[in-house]
Image (spheres, helix red, strand yellow):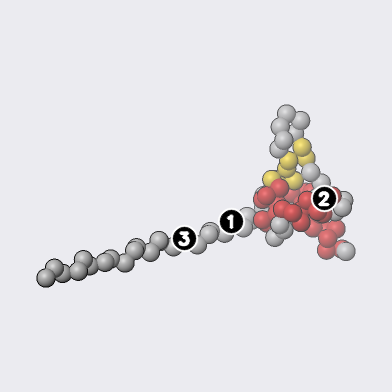
Amino acid sequence: MQKAARQTKPQATPKKAPRQKRPVLPLERKAYRIEEFCDVHRLSRSKYFELRKEGFGPRETRFEDSRTVIITEEAAAEWRAKRSAS
């Protein structure tokens, strides 16, 4: 009599590592890119663009030779002051 072939269980796929959150940047920055500004002020990018479209976004500085947009610390401070006064 032959022994039945031993069946092996299929290996489970390894679980993915949990997604790491982006670090919160300190407020002492001199200028922010839009993504950094959103991280620091706990805004989603979509909410940022919604506020900008409605005229409630911070003052932006654009460079002529690139598509880079920065928000200076002064512009961010003005924006925070306006939001807390509302």
Residue situated in front as seen by the camera: 6 or 11: 6
Please provide percent x and percent y for residue 75.
79, 49
Q: Which residue is drawn at 75% across and 46% down?
A: 71
Q: Name the residue type under label 2.
A: Arg
Which residue is at a point 72% across and 53% down the rendered structure image? 45
Label 3–label 2 contact, CB within 8 A: no
Front tag of 1 and 3 = 3
Please say whether residue 57 is visible from this viewpoint: no
Q: Distance between the residues labelled 1 and 3?
A: 15 Å
State how far apart marks 1 and 2 are (Cα): 23 Å
Residue 73 at least partly seen: yes
Point out residue 83 in the picture as x, y percentages from the top left corner: 83, 60
6 or 39, which is in the foreground? 6
Going from N to C along the chain, the mark reached first, 1 or 2, is: 1
Pointer 1 or 3: first along the chain: 3
Residue 37 on image: x %, y %:
70, 52
What residue is shown with label 1?
22
Residue hosting label 3: 17
- Tag 2 residue: 52
Write the residue at 46% across / 60% down.
Answer: 16
Q: Is 51 situated above or below 12?
A: above
Q: What element carries label 1?
A: loop
Label 2: how many residues lie within 10 Å, few (<14), some (14-19) or many (20+)? some
Location of residue 24 by image quarter: bottom right
Can you say which quadrant of the picture contains the N terminus?
bottom left
Q: How crowded is mark 3: few (under 14 residues within 10 Å), some or many (20 or more)?
A: few
Frontmost residue, 28 versus 21: 21
